Amino acid sequence: MRVAAVQLNSTADRVANLAVADRLTRAAAADGASLILLPEKWTAIGSDDQLRAAAEPLDGPSVQWAREIARARSSVCQWSRVVASVKAAGTRSTRAPSTARIR
């Protein structure tokens, strides 16, 4: 099994982070990696307000992207935290699931 650890300098800009992760992940898969590891909070990092602004549903664009990459490349993408928006009892909070493994 070939493993790739992808490093990137995440910012509060979730869309830009996803574009960089996409480029680096595709390069790792093209080099033969079947397990691709992304850093903690790769989707967004910043102040509490910036994290809230970058939050997305647990089945949002970042997870959908990882699923597409994994299926297209027959690989697994894994990361330790993704900023997610969770709606509970009419409120909106952000949380980061401990692990996301997409196959």
Image (cartoon, grey):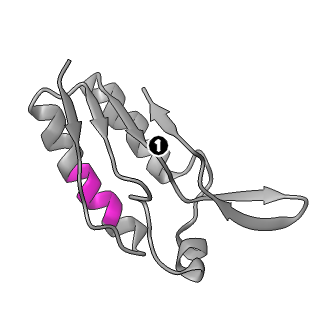
Q: Kindly indicate the quadrant of the structure image that contains residue 84.
A: bottom right
Q: Nearer the viewer, residue 37 or 61?
A: 37
Point out the stretch of residues depicted in magenta. 17-23
Determine whether 30 is above or below 25 in the image. above
Residue at image location 41% in from the left, 54% down from the top: 40
Residue 59 to residue 83: above or below: above
Residue 82 falls inside the magenta stretch? no
Q: Residue at 88% of width from left, 64% of height from top?
A: 90
Determine whether 89 is above or below 70 in the image: below
- Tell me where residue 87 appears, x and y as whole percent: 78, 58
Find residue 74 and report its image quarter.
top left
Give whichever of 96, 52 is nearer the camera: 96
Q: Nearer the viewer, residue 68 or 30?
A: 30
Q: Is residue 80 left or right of residue 84?
A: left
In percent of width and height, residue 94 lies at 66, 64
> What kind of residue is marked 1?
Gln
Q: Position of residue 103 (x, y in %)?
A: 42, 26
Residue at the extreme left = 31
Q: Secondary structure at mark 1?
A: helix
The residue under the point 57% across, 45% down is 98
Q: State the quadrant of the N terminus.
A: top left
At x 28%, y 60%, the residue is 19
Q: Main secondary structure of the magenta part?
A: helix
Q: Position of residue 78 (x, y in %)?
A: 40, 37
* Residue designated by label 1: 64
